Amino acid sequence: MTIAITQDDIVQGALDAASSPPSVAPPKGQVRKDARRDLGPVLAGNAALGLLGIAFLIPLAWIIVGSFDAKATWGIELPHWTLSNFSAALADGGLRSLGNSLLLSVTASLVSTVVAVMAAYSLVRRRVPWKGPLLLVVLFLSAIPVAIIIVPVYQIYVSLGWLSILPSALFLGVTSLPFEIWLLKNYFELLPVDLEEAAAIERANTYQILRRVVLPLSFPGVAASAIFGFVNAWGSFIVPLVLISPSSQATGPITIFGFMGAADVRYGDIAAFSLMYSVPIFILYGAMSRFFQGGFVLSGGVRG
């Protein structure tokens, strides 16, 4: 087949090329100005983040320096090196309060995580009436401060005789539920339904599907939920102070508060105990960080 090109086609092509504007590269000065204009907000943002990081590092530096200072004050100075602050902080029930905090936090985390897993899975995979308004109520409850409801909860606990560590852990677990339900709901929504249907075809019941398919695939979300419940109870001060009556069940934050007297503040003991009190959190994050690097592991679902 032969394609004939006439003179009119050649003329029309020349006219089109002449009418189209030529692509001109911007001058080098303009490129440099644009680069400087884009660099300004980046530098400002990095400077703001740097100042914010310094603001968070100053209290941590005070804790580290003050814990080894025999004459610790509220300021950061060259320390008079000593280890007596740690022994003084652990004396008079300090070590027992660390164990109480561990018991309180583990119990609260278990309660909140188990309930949040079942609630979030039901909301995602089951037909729940008024699911949308219910989720909005859950989201609203996550924004309510605990201090607002602590007085009526205290009255209820007094009437029931529950002013001890385990009922207080139950209440702290309930306060973590709204956030954990939303967190796990987002994880469960990303799971492929086909895997659960395949397990159902193999005659697996709901409990087996949840234990053998859902939980292995969503382990990073469940771990994050458990860590949130643990940290929420570990750093709680107002709830143990109000809801725990026996002095032998005092937790770590209450012990730190006891170092601040009306006439004297034991800065060295506060710094030493605070440093020891933060070690379990660092260990927890370090131990669990490897589970969050890979996201979902689709090979976690097993048959059987």
Image (tube, rainbow, N blue to C red):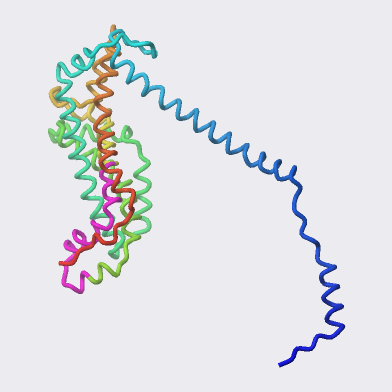
Residue shown at the point (80%, 61%) measured from the top left? 22
**What residue is rendered at 37% in x and 48% in y?**
139
Which residue is situated farthest in the front direction here? 2
**Magenta highlight on residue 219:** yes
Quarter of the rendering occupied by the C terminus: bottom left
The spot of residue 27 in percent (x, y) is 76, 47
**Left or right: 31, with 299 as reference point:** right
Residue 205 vs 254, above or below: the answer is below
What residue do we see at 50% from left, 33% from top? 49
- Above or below residue 165? Residue 302 is below
Quadrant the N terminus occupies: bottom right
Task: Say whether residue 240 is magenta.
Answer: no
Q: Identify the image quadrant of residue 5.
A: bottom right
Q: Residue 73 at what x, y percent from top left? A: 34, 10
Residues in magenta, as a range? 199-227
Quarter of the figure with residue 101: top left
